[in-house]
């Protein structure tokens, strides 16, 4: 699987609370929510994503946002995510004004992407990294014991695999993943099983016990984030960063819909502007 990383200059800072990235003055934040490319009219699923970023413990990203979301997954999955510092929920209906404001912000949104899934089946949405070192605890099984994970040269992200549903919704499968170390050679069985094929890849850890899926309607948002008080968890590794010497907190926002050739675009170009707001930023506006 190929990881696609945004062009953002970052430096790593190691802290006792997990892994943090340093983005300095953050000069390369061109890929924000409002600069997503226009929808490609292709058969399949179109998925938009953007990262919201605020100081750690920010009232809205750490508390208020989650008070108006519907938790995803079974009760057991919700507990498993919570024990690992993660949470995921669905926003629907009228968006909270603060959420709308953040979506439209140039300074607090980054890594905006629009992806069409037709021949493409899955993609990793980067959430933090590269980091020189990540260390966190992991509870893979509620009946098991916490283990300590330490990885070097890491890039963290959420793999997404959207699937069209018969009722026009899109089921989005999400799985935390971490690349680590240097590129290595691997041998795997060929597709026909008659031999071995050499691959040149960066080692990858998949956290399948923390994977979940959620059906999304056209105007619903999936938000995935971290509990700021759980500083030694995989949630901190995935969504805790550092900018200008200060720890910051991230939330990944995802929206998906089915597309077909010939469908008209959701929004006309804005008059007098060379840029078009993202569908994600516009969907929650009162109509």
Image: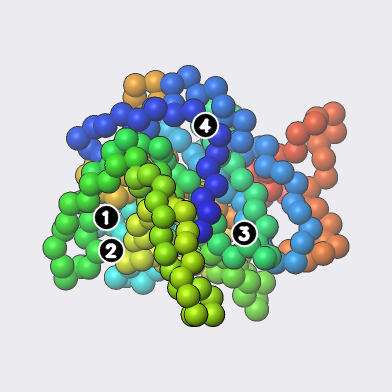
Q: CA distance from mark 4 to mark 2?
A: 32 Å
Q: Position of residue 206 (x, y in %)?
A: 37, 60
Residue position marked by numbered label 4 in the rendering: 8
Residue position marked by numbered label 1 in the rendering: 84
Given this view, does label 3 or label 4 mark the residue nearer the observer?
4
The residue under the point 82% across, 64% down is: 261
Circle 4 sits in a helix, a strand or a loop, which is it? loop
Q: Of callouts 4 and 2, which one flags the residue occurring earlier in the amino acid sequence?
A: 4
Tag shown at residue 80: 2
Residue position marked by numbered label 3 in the rendering: 256
The residue under the point 29% across, 42% down is: 152
The residue under the point 49% across, 66% down is: 197
CA neighbours of label 4 inside 10 A, class few (<14), some (14 to 19), many (20+): some
Q: Position of residue 166 (x, y in %)?
A: 65, 78
Q: CA distance from mark 3 to mark 4?
A: 25 Å
Q: Of callouts 1 and 3, which one flags the residue occurring earlier in the amino acid sequence?
A: 1
Q: CA distance from mark 2 to mark 1?
A: 6 Å
Q: CA distance from mark 1 to mark 3?
A: 26 Å
Which picture quadrant has residue 250?
Answer: top left
Report if residue 86 is visible in the image. Answer: yes
Confirm or deny contact between disc 2 and disc 1 (CB under 8 A): yes
Q: Of callouts 3 and 2, which one flags the residue occurring earlier in the amino acid sequence?
A: 2
């Amino acid at each position: 699987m190929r990881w696609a990383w945004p062009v953002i200059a970052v430096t790593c800072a190691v802290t006792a609370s997990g892994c943090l990235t340093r983005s300095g003055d953050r000069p390369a934040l061109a890929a924000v929510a409002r600069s997503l490319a226009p929808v490609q009219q292709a058969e399949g699923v179109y998925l938009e994503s953007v990262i919201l970023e605020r100081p750690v413990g920010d009232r809205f990203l750490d508390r208020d946002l989650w008070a108006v979301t519907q938790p995803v997954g079974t009760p057991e999955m919700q507990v498993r995510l919570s024990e690992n510092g993660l949470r995921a929920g669905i926003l629907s209906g009228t968006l909270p004004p603060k959420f709308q404001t953040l979506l439209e912000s140039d300074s607090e949104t980054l890594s905006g992407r629009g992806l069409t899934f037709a021949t493409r089946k899955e993609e990793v949405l980067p959430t933090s990294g590269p980091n020189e070192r990540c260390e966190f605890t992991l509870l893979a099984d509620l009946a098991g014991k916490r283990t300590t994970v330490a990885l070097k040269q890491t890039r963290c992200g959420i793999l997404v695999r959207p699937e069209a549903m018969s009722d026009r919704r899109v089921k989005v499968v999400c799985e935390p993943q971490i690349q680590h170390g240097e590129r290595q050679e691997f041998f795997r069985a060929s597709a026909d099983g008659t031999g071995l094929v050499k691959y040149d890849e960066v080692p990858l850890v998949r956290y399948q016990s923390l994977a979940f899926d959620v059906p999304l309607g056209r105007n619903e948002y999936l938000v995935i984030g971290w509990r700021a008080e759980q500083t030694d968890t995989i949630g901190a590794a995935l969504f805790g960063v550092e900018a200008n010497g200060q720890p910051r907190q991230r939330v990944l926002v995802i929206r998906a819909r089915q597309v077909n050739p010939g469908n008209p675009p959701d929004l006309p170009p804005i008059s007098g502007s060379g840029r078009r707001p993202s569908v994600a930023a516009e969907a929650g506006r009162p109509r």
